[in-house]
Amino acid sequence: MGQVFNQLNRGEAVTSGLRKVDKNEMTHKNPSLRTAGTVPSTSNSKSHSTTSTLTNPPSRPARPPKKELDGNKWIIENYENHQSPIEVRAERQHSVLISRCTSTVIQVIGKGNAISVDNCSRLDILMDSLVSSVDVVNTKNFRLQVQGKLPAIQLDKVDGATIYLSPDSMDTEIYTSKCTGINITPPARAAGEDSVELPIPEQIKSYFHNGQLINEIVEQKG
């Protein structure tokens, strides 16, 4: 490094060893020299042999539909546009796990323990009764019809759902989180009357009163 700085400290003497460029060698005075140094084409080189297939990777193969009883768990997954309802005969110790199903109807016959739904779209469930609850996560356009008794329903990140309750399930507790477009349809009050859809509130107003945080439902009118 000391030698490098000694060279730089020479001032103008640094360039004393450089050869002066003759006018015949200057490209701005001799345009013909510009074309002489053109880099040859490398269109046939390996660096340009990449094909467009790298930008369009092959799609993953569709997973086969599955319905099986694994111990006390019914597993139903990967059904899409299934023509007929998928029937599951559940007992009190059976849980039903439903995932990655689209445009499918599932009928749970008997009194099972619980039903869990994850990552489904346009899924319809027709069920008799449960000991525990129905849990639905990451699902769009979901419909549930209860014919018997259901203690609780838990919805998390559900976009669009309609739940039809039976006379025996009017005490069902419904929990929602990060959900939109949830409607509850209780049974008609009298024979011949139409059922009415009741929306679950989506907007909450929060404010402080006497040092305490108060949360109120904002009613949608009109």
Image (cartoon, rainbow, N blue to C red):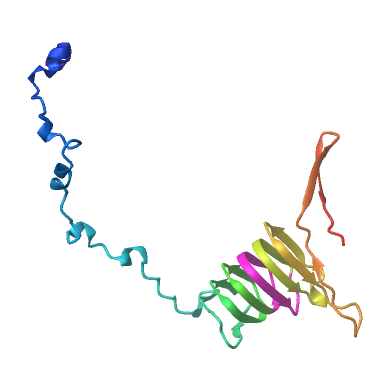
Residue at image position (21%, 57%) is 47
Left or right of 43, for residue 80:
right
Near-viewer residue (70 or 161):
161
Left or right of 206, for residue 114:
left
Figure check: 178 above or below 98: above
Which stretch did the figure color magenta? 127-150
Say whether residue 130 is magenta. yes
Q: Main secondary structure of the magenta part?
A: strand
Residue at image position (78%, 59%) is 201
Residue at image position (70%, 75%) is 144
Q: Position of residue 4 (x, y in %)?
A: 14, 17
Q: Quadrant of the N terminus?
A: top left
Left or right of 36, for residue 142:
right
Say whether residue 187 is magenta. no
Q: Position of residue 38 (x, y in %)?
A: 16, 48
Q: Quadrant of the C terminus?
A: bottom right
